[in-house]
Image: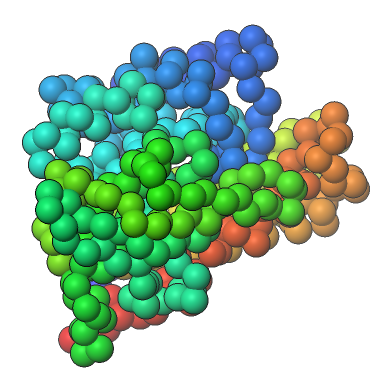
Amino acid sequence: MKAIRIPIIELPKESEELRDEIRQFISEEREKGTFEPKCDSWLSGYSPDLSKKMGERGWIGMTWPAKYGGQERSSIERYIVTEEFLAAGAPVAGHWIADRQSGPLFLKFGTEEQKMFFLPKIAKGECYFSIGLSEPNAGSDLAAIKSRAVKVDKGWILNGSKIWTSGAHFSHYMITLCRTSTQDPNNRHAFMSQLVVDLSSSGVTIRPIQLMTGEHHFNEVFFDDVFIPDEMVVGEIGNGWNQGMAELAYERSGPERFLSTFPLLNELTNILVEQGDKNGLNQVSTVVSRLWTLRNMSLGIAQLLEEGVPSNTIASLVKDMGTKLEQEMAEIARLVVNVTPSLQSDSLIERFMAQSILHSPGFTLRGGTTEILRGIVAKGVIQK
């Protein structure tokens, strides 16, 4: 068996100054009426105004080199920014994917031209990305994708489709995994590449998939003879699978995998404290202990990623455990307080419960299903 070791991170005292700065900013924005807090805000909360304000403060692309618009700050400082905005239920969906994984992907595999073009715009909170992975008829088997790009003069012609594409309707670009050669039945992961698709291009069609809340978050995206210039190939042709797997470690290990329903937990705790409900607080304490464990694991992975240590196995573990807890949160709240979930309610607890219940089916699907993640973990701990 392979040992999985995650470093224990002690946050420096200076980090509290950054945390205080963020909390003051969030409090001021709420007082201005800039946003109303909600659960799952990192995917369903879209505010170009807030994204630009965060960019102005240097809170997007924080770890990137200064010449690309970054602040050259640590991954732990970025983590603090991330968890504070998640805990507040702030609408950060616009820049989220670009900041979390598209930018780091360009830094690792992109050309200098790509870095200079995309990264400063992302850091300003003005350029949004979506992820082109899942496809109809492929299910959780990403190796079964059929979208294909054929080489032409000065570029590629892309045909196919993607599904469950978060935020494609407000994104500017999509990093799309596709086949750039005939599929090899003996090596299903070969001959895939990553292309940057300008979502305003001719031949791109985006259709909404509405949540049970009526919100538009997911999409189907269709490519009909879409031209992709050669300079929009990310990394090496044929290396798309390996690049995509490296990218997913950023996607699966962050605090968004266990803090989507934190606003509900926070409001539930406030109510129980006001009521002096010791039994209810005792039940909630078990949730908090699990949350704290996940946070420590996630912080450790953030450090490993900064050091360039492969972390796909433990990232998958955090994602599996975290999204399971997120799904349980609404049921835990239901058992300790007597409220009626309602999206239209003026009561935060009722509104947060409704959001958590209606969004929860997607928690264990997005970023990799539970079954796929457990397969990755199993393979990762078995000594070859």
Q: From where the camera sits, is residue 291 visible?
A: no
Residue at 30% x, 80% y is 379
Is residue 308 or residue 216 the one in the foreground? 216
Residue at 10% x, 42% y is 111
Residue at 16% x, 61% y is 151
Residue 224: image quadrant is bottom left
Q: From where the camera sits, is residue 335 visible?
A: yes
Q: Position of residue 73 (x, y in %)?
A: 23, 27
Residue occupying the far left of the picture? 112
Indicate the quadrant containing the C terminus: top left, top right, bottom left or bottom right. bottom left
Q: Where is residue 76 in the image (x, y as percent from the top left)?
A: 31, 36
Left/right placement of residue 111 relative to residue 313 reads: left
Residue at 82% x, 56% y is 335
Q: Position of residue 99 (x, y in %)?
A: 34, 36
Q: Where is residue 179 in the image (x, y as percent from the top left)?
A: 26, 68
| 224 up-or-down from 93: above or below | below
Residue 26: image quadrant is top right
Is residue 317 or residue 67 the one in the foreground? 67
Is residue 172 or residue 51 the one in the foreground? 172
Give the mark count.
0
| 114 up-or-down from 367: above or below | above
Residue 177: image quadrant is bottom left
